[in-house]
Image: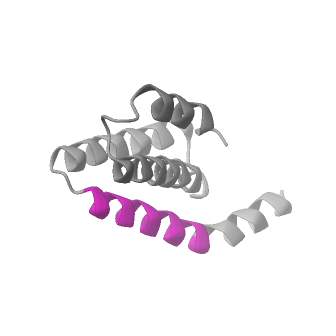
Amino acid sequence: MILIPELIVLVSSIPGIIPSLDFILLAVFAVSLLMLFHCLLYLLKTETKTFIEMVFATCIIVFFLILYSAYFVILASLIFASVVIFFTRYFRYENLVSDE
């Protein structure tokens, strides 16, 4: 829902320049990166400074992998990391918040 305006502008402004596979990769990449950032919040007792450092490190790593053209490696690793963090930390986070 957050990325719908960006995707509309992207699709309407340059339809013939970018192949359709790149549109799909861009959408999946954006959703998986946002999903990872959201799942990083489930890490217990994470301070704001630590979270910002993790987001910065993730962006730097993803930037260099994009320069290396490892798109599917990026997508697979982002989705895998998000799923692992979610399933290992979600229920623990929920119990911690309800105890307080």
Query: Could you tell me which residue is drawn at 58 percent across and 39 percent down?
Result: 3
Quadrant where the N terminus is found in the figure: top right
On screen, residue 51 versus residue 96, left or right, reads: left
Q: Quadrant of the C terminus?
A: bottom right
Magenta stretch encompasses residue 79: yes
Q: Nearer the viewer, residue 17 or 84?
A: 17
80 versus 100 height, above or below: below
x, y percent for residue 94? 76, 64
> What is the magenta segment's predominant secondary structure?
helix
Point out residue 32 in the picture as x, y percentages from the top left corner. Answer: 48, 55
Q: How is the image coloured?
A: one colour
Q: Is residue 46 above or below residue 88?
A: above
Residue at (56% x, 33% y) in the render: 8
- For this orientation, the residue located farthest to the front is 16
Q: Residue at x 56, y 42 (%)?
A: 47
**Which residue range is magenta in the image?**
71-88
**Numbered circles on residues, count:** 0
Tell which of 91 and 64 is nearer to you. 64
Q: Is residue 30 left or right of residue 25?
A: right
- Identify the residue shown where x is 30% and y is 62%: 72
- Residue 48 against residue 31 in the figure, above or below: above
Residue 95 placed where, x, y %?
77, 68
Residue 6 counted in the magenta span: no
Give the residue at the far left of this rendering.
68
